[in-house]
Amino acid sequence: MMPLWKKNIFVRVVNRRMQYEGKTAEEILLEYPALTEDEKTEILAAL
């Protein structure tokens, strides 16, 4: 489980990038190779 502060940052970043760049959340998360699959799942669930 990732720290709450980290999840909140990624949720905000992904939301903004979806809005401004027109990408899906999955496409955006692919650009962050350091995130584990569990972390990506947590972020997607919070969106």
Image (cartoon, grey):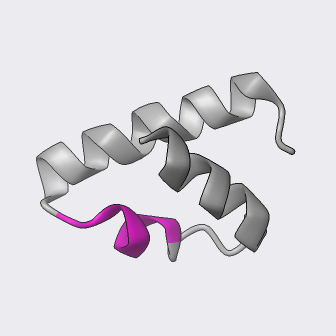
| Extreme-top residue of the structure | 5
- Numbered marks: total: 0
On the picture, is 8 further left or further right than 16?
Answer: right
Measuring from the top left, give residue 45's x and y in whole percent.
Answer: 52, 48
Residue 34 in sight: no
Q: Nearer the viewer, residue 27 or 31?
A: 27
Residue plotted at (65% across, 50% down): 42
8 over 19 or under it: above or below: above
Front residue of 29 and 47: 47
Q: Is 27 one of the magenta-colored residues?
A: yes
Using the rendered view, name the quadrant where residue 19 is placed.
Answer: top left
Characterize the magenta stretch by its predominant secondary structure.
helix
In the image, taking residue 13 as reference, residue 9 lies left or right, namely right
Instruction: Please state the horizontal and vertical placement of residue 46, each as a whole percent of the image.
Output: 51, 39
Give me the residue at 51% from left, 72% from top: 31
Q: Is residue 41 visible?
A: yes
Residue at 83%, 31% (x, y): give it.
3
- Indicate left or right for 16 with 10 as reference: left
Measured from the top left, where is residue 20 in percent x and y? 14, 47
Direction from residue 19 to residue 7 in the image, left or right: right
Q: Residue at 16% across / 57% down in the picture?
A: 21
Quadrant of image for the N terminus: top right
Residue 20 covered by magenta stretch: no
The boundaries of the magenta stretch are 23-29
Can you say which quadrant of the picture contains the C terminus?
Answer: top left
Residue 37 x %, y % = 72, 72
